[in-house]
Image: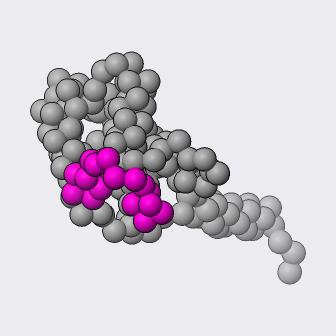
Amino acid sequence: MAATPEKHAQILGVCLAAGLLYFSTLGEPHPGPEPPVPDGTADLRSAFAGSNRTRPQQREDAQALADQCAAVAEFVEFDGRSEQPRLKTGNQVHDLRITTRHLVEHGGSYGAAYPVLGERLAAFLAERVGNDDEPLSGASRKQWHDAFADLSAALQRAARGL
């Protein structure tokens, strides 16, 4: 039995439909569950509420602050591998955070724009690492790194949710 042009068109249509269905499933993989939320950072998205900034500005601010925290975490870790670390105390890590803030925020403060956020970040850091002049050990340096890395992750989650 010979195939007719109508049969060819039907077969071609079915193949095209199957191909479209197949390729539509090849997009971005569905994200898995979010990693566990560090204590004290679960609701940072709500800390951006109540400001006079728009949602897109809030999202940008959350991401910029996340990047800032990630940079501090990376430097704390990098500095610890140096033969002569520059950061020797917790106060110096705190000063690094402030210097980074001045550079990124051009002298401003996200804490001023979002007072609740500033309070939560300060409380989180006080609980996790304190703010002392004790010499940094390998363990305390890791605590500082992990605290800023956790803040960065929490702020990234907030940016995605704003």
How many labels sit on residues? 0
Residue 132 drawn in magenta = yes
Position of the N terminus by quadrant: bottom right
- Return the residue found at the far bottom: 1
Position of the C terminus by quadrant: top left
Q: Residue at x 21, y 57 (%)?
A: 127
**The quadrant where residue 4 appears:** bottom right
- Return the residue found at the far right: 2
Relative to 106, is 143 above or below? below
* Residue 61 visible to an observer of this rendering: yes
| Residue 86 rendering spot, x and y as whole percentages | 53, 42
| Residue 125 rendering spot, x and y as whole percentages | 26, 51
- Return the residue found at the far top: 106
What stretch of residues is rendered in magenta?
124-142
Decide which of 142, 61 is in the foreground and name it. Answer: 142
Would residue 40 be found to the left or right of residue 95 on screen? left
Q: Residue at x 58, y 58 (%)?
A: 27
* Residue 44 visible to an observer of this rendering: no
Would residue 127 be found to the left or right of residue 99 on screen? left
**The quadrant where residue 95 appears:** top left
| Residue 48 rendering spot, x and y as whole percentages | 21, 38
Residue 53 drawn in magenta = no
Would residue 55 be found to the left or right of residue 33 on screen? left
Q: Residue at x 38, y 65 (%)?
A: 34
Relative to 151, is 104 above or below? above
